[in-house]
Every structure is written in structure tokens, then in C-alpha cells.
Amino acid sequence: MKDNFFFRRKTTWKTTLSFKLIIFFSFFFVIVLFRDFWLQSIYEILVPEPNIEVADAILIEGWTNDKEIQLAVDLFKRGFGKYIFTSGYKIGRFADCYKSDNYAEVTKEQVSKMGIEDYKIIPIIQPERGTYNEAISSKLLFEKYNIKSVLIVTTNWHMLRTYLTYKKVFEGKPITFYLAPVEAEMCKVNNWWKSHYGLEYLFGEYLKLIYYWCKGYI
């Protein structure tokens, strides 16, 4: 039997180099042609849509920036929560720059300066770093304050892992979580691939999601 353009036979059928090149360039062409679709999809899979509802508490989650704190305070003043919970681990090498050595306390100070009474701001002091440990540390406080619904405020690229982690930790508990993702300037749907920060945020978060899934945290 003669070899054809796509296949040749020795002891078994094997694809020719020409056929492999056609497959490769076809695949490359499809990626380039639908580039905007793939880039948008990578973002949208990771970043859930906002689901802002009135809740018992507002949680400022993670290593927050001014935008997250401002949104949480604005939502609180508009009646979207009775309490504001702040979270965070030890500050570390920048501790000398703050009055407290814990991000949860530092965030509480910032919220207090924006006109919220101290007794309505509850810091979640976590003994170990990480979103999972933070969720574990929040359980007793949520029970103490009879929290049945929480509006989570955190950065857009971190929201999915936060939500899935809290959902897992509070599995079987009568508590509902709402989402208020804050758009990071360098990690938007139309620019996340244009800087190393956006690439690091998104792909780093994908890797952490895989790790959390393997550990059973989500």
C-alpha cells in the first residue's frame, strides 16, 4: 500500500509530519481567531457575578485595599448589614507601620475612622494564614452574633475561592452568602493579560483553587 499525504504505514499507522503541522496550525488559528472569547472566558470562570443583598453582616475579606473597605462602609451605611467583620493574619515585616500587628485590627481602625461605631466592627483574628483558616476562625463569631447571612466584600479575582471556602466550612449550617466583588484595576475582564500583576492574580488563583480542592477545603 502506498503512503498518502496524511498517513504512512510501517508496522502501525502513524500520522505524517505534514498532518501534524496542519493540526497544529489549525489549532493555533482557532486560538488566535477566538482570542477575545478565550481571554474573557478565563476571567469570567474565575470571577462570579455580584450578588449584593441585605445581610446580617458584611465581611471585609482578605488583605484588603482602600476600595474594598470603602465599598463595605458604603454598603453598611446604606443598610446592607448590621455588623462589619474584618479579617486578616499577622502583618509581619510592616508591623511597625501600624498600631496593631494584625490586618483584621488594622482594617477595623480604618473602618472606625470612616464613622462606624466600634461595637459594630468585629475583627476575625486567625491563628494561621489563609482563606480556609479565616473561615474556620469566623465560625464562633458568626454564631455569637447570630449571623445567618453574610455579604462578602473582596477583590474580584479572589472572590470565587473565598465563596467556595466559606460555603464548605459552613456546610449544613443555616447561613447564606452574598457576593460583592471589587474590581482590581489591573485585573479587569478587558485588561488582565496586559500586566504581570493580572496574570499573576488570575493564574495564581486558579492554582490555589486546585490546591484547595485537593485539600478538601472547597
Image (cartoon, helix red, strand yellow):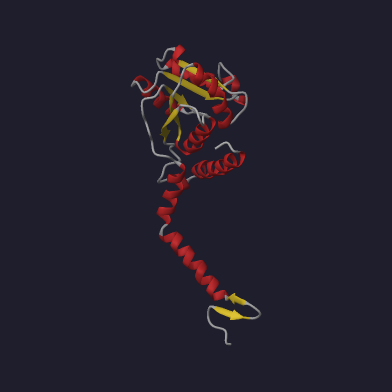
Q: Position of residue 115 (x, y in %)?
A: 40, 15
Residue 6: in sight, yes or no?
A: yes
**Quadrant position of residue 176:** top left
Q: Quadrant of the C terminus?
A: top right
Residue at the outermost right position = 11
Q: Is residue 89 above or below residue 44?
A: above
Residue at the far bottom: name it.
1
Count of residue discs: 0
In the displayed structure, does residue 1 sit left or right of residue 120? right
The residue drawn where x is 49% and y is 45% is 195
The quadrant in which the N terminus is found is bottom right
Query: Could you tell me residue 21's position as x and y percent?
Result: 53, 71
Instruction: Pick the residue in front: 213 or 174.
Output: 174
Left or right? Give the position of 44 relative to 209: left
The residue shown at (41%, 49%) is 40
- Seen from the viewer's position, the closer of residues 167 and 204 is 167
Give the residue at x 41% y 21%: 56
Q: Position of residue 217 (x, y in %)?
A: 57, 36
The x and y percentages for residue 27 are 48, 64
